[in-house]
């Protein structure tokens, strides 16, 4: 703990959640000396918020452990009625040690409740920027629903704004397929938030990925999809769906111009091309492009 009055984010966060619980520094240190335990005696916490491990980063850690060993102890708790322990914090180091062929790993052993384990695991991962947005949202959801923390308490614990907590939890409302794109990094949290209000989030998510749209372009596309129904009624009540080639052309033009583009086909050879701008800067840019032709 720094004596300058600035606590580590992790220590401050756990204190905010756990009250008088002894603080844990962001380095993982606690008020006791580490011991060495066989890796085989340590079990993964099934409720650990982080589920996805980037292969490239994990391999870098494995290579480091092979050369230098595990320099920073992990945190575990005893499993009642057994001789084994449950992992609380430091899963990447534990996994890397196993992959590196180590038999023992330095640990801090603490007696912790289920609530404390959940809180420590989430805050430790958040402060180390180890979670993707979906894992982060699930962690916040557990703290609020299962352990009855308010959004304000969670926000203080992880040094985030209350709106960030609310917006991140809302990502769990997206279809599972869209969440998978977010986990893989195909979409950013900004893209995902824009898709929350879409009627067909998965279809629009695919367009965003294929066209490489920015967050602003995604927001415009979602607004357009909500204001311009895809299905129009003819006089004879037949239903007409916009041609897939027209939609592909709209996406291509939108990507090239940075604007929302709509193509309305009146006849097989005639139609209307509509460009929607959100700022005067976008209009000026479009005018410059047209004048330079």
Image (cartoon, helix red, strand yellow):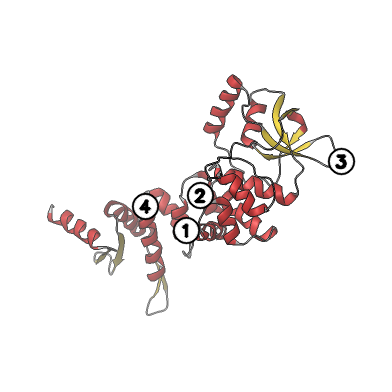
| Residue at which label 4 appears | 214
Residue 22: quadrant of the picture: top right
Residue 88 horizontal/vertical position (percent) = 69, 41
| Residue at which label 3 appears | 81
Crowding at dot 1, Cα within 10 Å, few <14 / some 14-19 / many 20+, comes out as: some
Query: Nearer the viewer's eye, disc 3 or disc 1?
Result: 3
The answer for how far apart the CA atoms under marks 4 and 1 are is 13 Å
Q: Which of pointers 4 and 1 lies earlier in the amino acid sequence?
A: 1
Relative vertical location of residue 229 with respect to residue 163 in this rendering, above or below:
below
Image quadrant holding the N terminus, namely: top right
Q: Which of pointers 3 and 2 lies earlier in the amino acid sequence?
A: 3
The answer for how far apart the CA atoms under marks 3 and 1 are is 45 Å
Residue shown at 46%/57% (left/top)?
Answer: 203
Residue shown at 65%/44% (left/top)?
Answer: 23
| Residue at which label 2 appears | 182
Query: Nearer the viewer's eye, disc 3 or disc 2?
Result: 3
């Amino acid at each position: 703990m720094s004596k300058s009055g600035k606590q580590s984010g992790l220590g401050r966060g756990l204190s905010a959640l756990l009250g008088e619980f002894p603080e844990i520094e962001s380095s993982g240190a606690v008020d006791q000396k580490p011991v060495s335990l066989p890796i085989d005696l340590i079990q993964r916490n099934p409720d650990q918020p982080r589920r996805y491990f980037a292969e490239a980063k994990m391999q870098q850690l494995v290579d480091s452990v092979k050369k230098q060993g595990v320099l920073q102890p992990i945190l575990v708790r005893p499993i009642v009625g057994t001789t084994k322990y449950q992992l609380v914090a430091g899963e990447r180091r534990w996994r890397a040690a196993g992959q590196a062929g180590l038999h023992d790993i330095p640990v801090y052993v603490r007696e912790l409740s289920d609530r404390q384990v959940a809180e420590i695991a989430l805050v430790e991962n958040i402060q180390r920027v180890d979670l993707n947005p979906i894992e982060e949202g699930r962690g916040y959801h557990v703290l609020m629903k299962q352990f009855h923390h308010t959004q304000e308490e969670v926000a203080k614990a992880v040094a985030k704004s209350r709106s960030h907590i609310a917006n991140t939890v809302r990502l769990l409302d997206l279809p599972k397929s869209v969440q998978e794109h977010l986990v893989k990094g195909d979409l950013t949290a900004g893209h995902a938030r824009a898709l929350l209000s879409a009627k067909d989030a998965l279809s629009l998510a695919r367009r965003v990925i294929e066209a490489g749209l920015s967050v602003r372009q995604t927001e415009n596309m979602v607004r357009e999809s909500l204001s311009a129904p895809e299905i129009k009624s003819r006089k004879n009540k037949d239903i007409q769906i916009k041609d897939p080639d027209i939609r592909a052309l709209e996406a291509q033009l939108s990507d090239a111009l940075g604007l929302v583009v709509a193509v309305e086909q009146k006849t097989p050879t005639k139609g209307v091309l509509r460009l929607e701008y959100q700022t005067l800067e976008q209009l000026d840019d479009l005018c410059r492009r047209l004048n330079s032709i």
